[in-house]
Image (cartoon, rainbow, N blue to C red):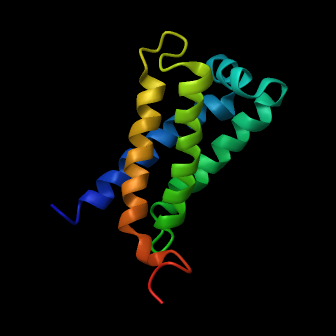
Amino acid sequence: MKKYIPLILKLVAAIIMLQTLYFKFGGAQESIDLFTKIAGDNEASMRIGTGVIELIASILLFVPRKTWLGALLAVGTMSGAVFSHLTILGIEHDNDGGILFASALVTLIASGILLLMNKQDIPLIGKK
């Protein structure tokens, strides 16, 4: 079971991040509204930029020796998402029952655990 935990964490984080890309890249009104509240006139840049970072993070999670980098990108992105929910959007956004917030929190936790599990691969602080 122990060897499956990293795979489960990677799948959970990647699936959550990848399923939101349709809305971000497709310009769904819900996504536009959310990023407009956060970034105002810079909505499109932040929405697309966040999507690109999440796509790269999702891919890197499955690249040996680069899992740490994917996890770090996911931790950074999801920290921003959680912070935005707590300060700007609210835990429940657009009557979603808190699903977006919970998804960001689950992804943050999963990627944080992966980052810790792969700390030996991080340059400068990992194995020499």
Residue 80, image x, y percentages: 59, 39
Extreme residue toward the right, this view = 41
Extreme residue toward the top, this view = 95
Residue at (34% x, 52% y) in the render: 9
Residue at (45% x, 45% y) in the render: 108
Above or below — where is 67 with respect to 53?
Answer: below
| Residue 76 or residue 20, whichever sits in front | 76
Residue 8, image x, y percentages: 30, 52
Above or below — where is 112 with respect to 23?
Answer: below
Quadrant of the rendered image containing residue 89: top right
Residue at (15% x, 61% y) in the render: 1
Extreme residue toward the bottom, this view = 128
Extreme residue toward the left, this view = 1
Horizontal relation, residue 28 to residue 86: left or right: right
Residue 83, image x, y percentages: 56, 34
Residue at (18% x, 64% y) in the render: 2
